[in-house]
Amino acid sequence: MLITDAALVDGRVRDVRVEGERISAVERGLTPDSDERVIPADGRLLFPGAIDVHVHFREPGFPHKETWETGSRSAAAGGVTTVVDQPNTDPATTTGAGFDAKATLAEASLVDYGINGGVTPDWEPDVLFDRPIFALGEVFLADSTGEMGIDAELFAEAVDRARDAGATVTVHAENADLFDEAAIESLEDDSDADSPPSSPTGRSAPADAWSAYRTAEAEIDAIERAVAVANDADAPVHVAHTSTPEGVDAAVDAGATCEVTPHHLFLSREDLPRLGTFGRMNPPLRSEDRRAALFERVADGTVDVIATDHAPHTVEEKEQPLLEAPSGVPGVETMLPLLLETVRQGRLEPERVRDLVAATPAKLFDLPQKGKVEPGRDADLVLVDPDRPRETQAGGLHSKAGWTPFEGLWGVFPELTMVRGTVVYTRDPETGAETFGPAVGENVRPEE
Ligand SMILES: [Zn+2]
């Protein structure tokens, strides 16, 4: 296959040859062989497939929210060619049986995938580390919250085991002791009232009650504690979905790496009157000042990675009152389009976006075959017209969730996505007609 006249992130225009699963040449003036398929890029942008190191594809256990097929279609249509799935499925990926159940279902994936092993009091570390797990995560240092939270002692044990196995620990850092219970107490008092909810957030809930409850201080404190434990053990730690600039600084200053989600980058507490319970996630949306400071740290290179925490729930589930609505928003399909729109607006450099969603995750998680458009690497490629954005609309997305918190925001969406040389998604920009390719996704894991 030959992709002609493709613009690369550094502005060079090159022909890109794909042989089998790999890129074999990135040069000028390549001529097609007689039997070679030619894809004319005509100066459009050829971007490396994005690597989303934080998704919840919900199988096994919750196929009404998402399946490996629908989640990976959503990824492919958003230019994500590798995902890393988190362990809070049913069964959880904390035992050999849990891993095996997920590994079988993941064979339905159109994109490559890693499977994280989880840590709970009944986890099976010996068995898990015998399996091809990607990393440990997201390990929830939060004492006991019913969300796979673990205490400091078990966290320290997990860090030791991961270090010995050469694995990274990805941590969800929120200290429940520092949550502001007063922010939601009045909602609990109201739960028996028989009047119907007057707003999506429930009767008397201020729109941003969840943000007031799960405080910034709870995140910052937990990051400091988690990174200190990892540093004591001389183990690599990666802080998931860092929602505050102070949290980013705490992680980076202590030598850890961190990720930021698109929702913490593009949404704030000011969006909650519109989003209602659809804007409930953990950690929650922060103030507009914190959001802007987070964007600065993304633009200047302080933040290592953008990952989505794609956590789909149905509309019916999210329409419940605030305390019953589950936490989480979908995002795997909109991450790259929203970031490429900021490039179009001149707010981020294209190379920076390449690093945030492809090159740096490939480097941090030892995937040397991925992350850049270079000879010898996997042909994980995304073709986009950088000057042709369209409005994000839930009806045009492919997650089972059926809604998006980014409704109405502009994005630069892919026209073609390829996973190791196989075209898994196309969209005709004139007609909007789409095609999906076969389930070629394979389990990938950090190189030893
Ligand atoms: Zn998550």
Image (cartoon, grey):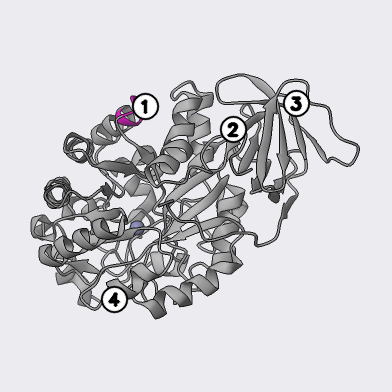
**Nearer the camera: disc 1 or disc 2:** 2
Q: Which residue is mark 2?
A: 374
On screen, residue 216 above or below 399: above
Q: Residue at x 33, y 61 (%)?
A: 327
Of the 4 image quadrants, the one containing the N terminus is top right
Q: Secondary structure at mark 4?
A: loop
Q: Residues within 10 Å of mark 4 (few under 14, many from 20)?
A: some
| Label pair 1/3, CB-CB below 8 angstroms | no
Q: Earlier in the sequence, mark 4 or mark 1?
A: 4
Q: Residues within 10 Å of mark 3 (few under 14, many from 20)?
A: few
Q: Earlier in the sequence, mark 3 or mark 2?
A: 3
Magenta stretch mostly in which secondary structure? helix
| Amino acid type, label 4 | Glu
How far is the residue under mark 4 from the one under mark 2? 39 Å
How far is the residue under mark 4 from the one under mark 3? 52 Å
Residue range corresponding to the magenta coloring: 297-301
The one of 129 and 315 positioned closer to us in this rendering: 129
Q: Secondary structure at mark 1?
A: helix
Q: Which residue is mark 3?
A: 42
Residue 364 in view = yes
Q: Secondary structure at mark 3?
A: loop
On screen, residue 188 above or below 358: below
| Amino acid type, label 1 | Ala
How far is the residue under mark 4 from the one under mark 1? 40 Å
From the top left corner, tell me how far across and down residue 75 is, in percent. Answer: 55, 52
For residue 386, which quarter of the picture? top right
From the top left corner, tell me how far across and down residue 389 is, in percent. Answer: 60, 33
How far is the residue under mark 1 from the one under mark 3? 29 Å
- Tag of residue 245: none
Q: Which residue is mark 1?
A: 299
**Nearer the camera: disc 3 or disc 2:** 2
Query: Is residue 33 within the magenta segment?
Result: no
